[in-house]
Amino acid sequence: MKSTAPLLQLPVDEDLYLRRATAADAQDLYFIIDRDRPYLREWLPFIDFTQDPGDTEAYLKYVSASNNTSDLVFVIVHEREVCGLIGYKRIDRLNKKLEIGYWLAEHKQGKGIMRRSCQTLLAYAFEKLRMNRIEIRVGVDNQRSSNIPRQLGFTLEGVERDGEFLNDHYHDLEVYSLLRSEYEG
């Protein structure tokens, strides 16, 4: 018997909320990926491997599976439109740390959506999940993305050299962190 429990939903603002991602979101998310492919491809390594809605559905099934304890992924819904993903990666309950990853449709950029969504995930991670450390990794020179941890009070710890394979080359990642003792929720 399938569970009829409501999906985890986190309110951000009156026009913005985060909802736990499911395989049912595959079509909407794939549409964004395919439409914004040149834009998203500049910083996201999975874009070239996402060639049809089935690829997105397989990812969503993986992250929403009941036995997956290392990821918690949400769709970003702004003005009733699914416009991106945000979530926790590499959840380490023993050491009470995790990483936040995110991407957003090109036409939704510059509205503060990602910063506000990250603020909501920070509060949930520190207050509900009782985490001690949160990281955000950003491609070096990805100014828009690196502005987010800076605005939220994260510390730049350094650069992870060749931290990610992007398209046809390795590139460096800036590593930002925020500790519970630094969090001003």
Image: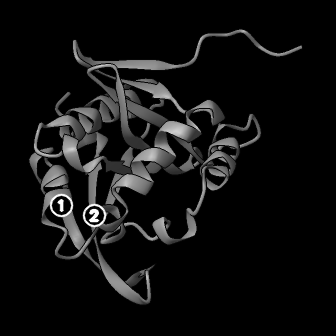
Locate residue 21, reporting x and y percent.
54, 33
Residue drawn at x 41%, y 90% is 169
Q: In this view, does 63 lie to the left or right of 132?
A: right
Say above or below: 125 vs 151. Answer: above
Residue at the far bottom in the pictured view: 169
Residue 110 is at least partly visible in this image: yes
Say above or below: 122 vs 175. Answer: above
Q: What element carries label 2?
A: helix
In front of the other: label 1 or label 2? 2
Mark 2 surroundings within 10 Å by alpha-carbon count, few (fewer than 14), some (14 through 19), many (20 or more): few
Location of residue 112 by image quarter: top left
Kindly indicate whether the residue at mark 2 contacts the one at mark 1 (C-beta within 8 angstroms): no
Locate residue 66, reporting x and y percent.
74, 34
* In the foreground, 26 or 18: 26
Location of residue 93 by image quarter: top right
Q: In this view, does 135 lie to the left or right of 63?
A: left
Residue drawn at x 10%, y 44% is 110
Locate residue 160, reporting x and y percent.
34, 80
Marks 1/2: CA–CA distance: 16 Å
Q: Name the residue under label 1.
A: 146
Of label 1 and label 2, which has the lower sequence position?
A: 2
Q: Name the residue under label 2.
A: 39
Which amino acid, mark 1? Ser
* In the foreground, 150 or 27: 27
Say above or below: 162 vs 17. Answer: below
Where does the N terminus fall, quadrant-wise?
A: top right
* In the foreground, 34 or 75: 34
Q: Is mark 1 on a helix, strand or loop?
A: helix
Which amino acid, mark 2? Tyr
